Amino acid sequence: MRNDPASIKAFLSERKKQSLYRSLRVSQSAQQPVMFIDGKECLNFCSNDYLGLANHPEIITSFKTAADVYGVGSGASHLINGHSKEHQKLEDAIAEFTGRDNALLFSNGYMANMGVINALLNRGDLLFQDRLNHASLIDAGLLSKAKMQRYQHNDMNHLLKLYAKISEEDKSRNSMLVTDGVFSMDGDEAAIRELSNLSKKHQAWLMVDDAHGFGVLGETGAGLLQQENLSQDDIPILMATLGKACGTSGAFVAGSHDLIEYLKQTARTFIYTTALPSSIAAATLTSLKIIQNDTWRREHLRALISRFKSGAEQLEIQLMPSNTAIQPIVVGSTAKAVELSNALEDQNILVTAIRPPTVPDGSSRLRVTFSANHTFDHVDMLLSALNKVC
Ligand SMILES: *Cc1c(COP(=O)(O)O)cnc(C)c1O
């Protein structure tokens, strides 16, 4: 972008013309199904608070109690003196919950992905990513200067073909496979068992970003890897965020003792940043307990999802092959997606339009998400609003 007022104005007005302009909504309430946003009440179907924990009283109490002891800011990076007993307890609890040796906290998922991929790959190494992986994984790959190739979504044959084409000279290179566990804009699950077999065959690292599976999938909510019964040997690098189903903030990477020690030495987004507030760690510890104890949250969420799916089928609204809390309605044209989202908003229902470059051109969509705090009535209200606008 040139440093002149006309260029930036032209860019902005072009964005508006293409229905690609993004603007902020201002909320005046906590993250919950019924919110007060931009001065009016609306029913929210776009958050990632899948278990309804972002505003949970016990988690809030833990947050406040820890703030009384530790204050607000952690004041330094983990390796200086910002790493408190709450951080340590949380890392230990995550390792136990996920069945990994150890875990390492990061300030957010974007930084965790940047940190891990760049710690493990050097210029010229080989990186294979699903075409629909989250932007933070793609950006991490670009920053690493590895030779990055993106395989067709969940297409193991395409990935095998890319492997077969590796030059003789590159065959001895360090390589890595990276996938979202649950795809953030589509809601479907990665073929992680196949990926695991492939990574073992080629001695490649395998990393799963389970931002949308952690808390939600698996018998006790440990995520997609628990659901698929895959161990640390099968999936050596597990990353997940704490700002979605956990309802707090931050992210972790879990794996073998040595991998985590290696990341402490080398992951720059871990080393050169201030530790999360201890009160966030304390709140997350409570959140993990609730995730494991409140089986009803996952059950209710599943019931909401099936009610929505069968309701949509009756209304002949085309959904994607997703069984998770992410239920996109692909409409194709960006203008149409924005128009539908606005029409829903007129009925006080909030479903955001997801547009390029977040999703590929021609696949703009309404991304409907559910939370365990929704009721069946909420789902029915959404269905009847969709019936009116679609
Ligand atoms: C949200 C998300 C991230 C980023 O996590 P933050 O903690 O919000 O920075 C990374 N990967 C995936 C798949 C995500 O959905």
Image (cartoon, rainbow, N blue to C red):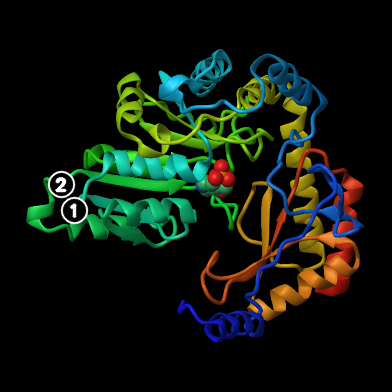
Q: Check disc 2 and report the residue beneath it.
A: 173
Q: Secondary structure at mark 2?
A: loop
Give me the residue at 50% from left, 22% from top. 82
Q: Which quadrant of the view contains residue 203?
A: top left
Pointer 1 with pointer 2, Cβ within 8 A: yes
| Residue nearest the viewer, comparing 369 with 141 | 141
Give me the residue at 55% from left, 13% from top. 85
Residue 80 tag number: none
Which amino acid type is shown beneath numbered disc 1? Gly
Q: Check disc 1 and report the residue beneath it.
A: 124
Residue 156 visible in rendering:
no
Q: Left or right: where does residue 30 sit relative to residue 158?
A: right
Q: Which quadrant of the view contains residue 118?
A: top left
| Residue nearest the viewer, comparing 249 with 291 | 249
Q: Which quadrant of the view contains residue 236?
A: top left
The image position of residue 6, as x and y in percent, is 56, 86
The image position of residue 163, as x and y in percent, is 22, 55
Q: Left or right: where does residue 256 sit relative to residue 162?
A: right
Q: Secondary structure at mark 1?
A: loop
Give me the residue at 66% from left, 21% from top. 71
Which amino acid type is shown beneath numbered disc 2? Arg
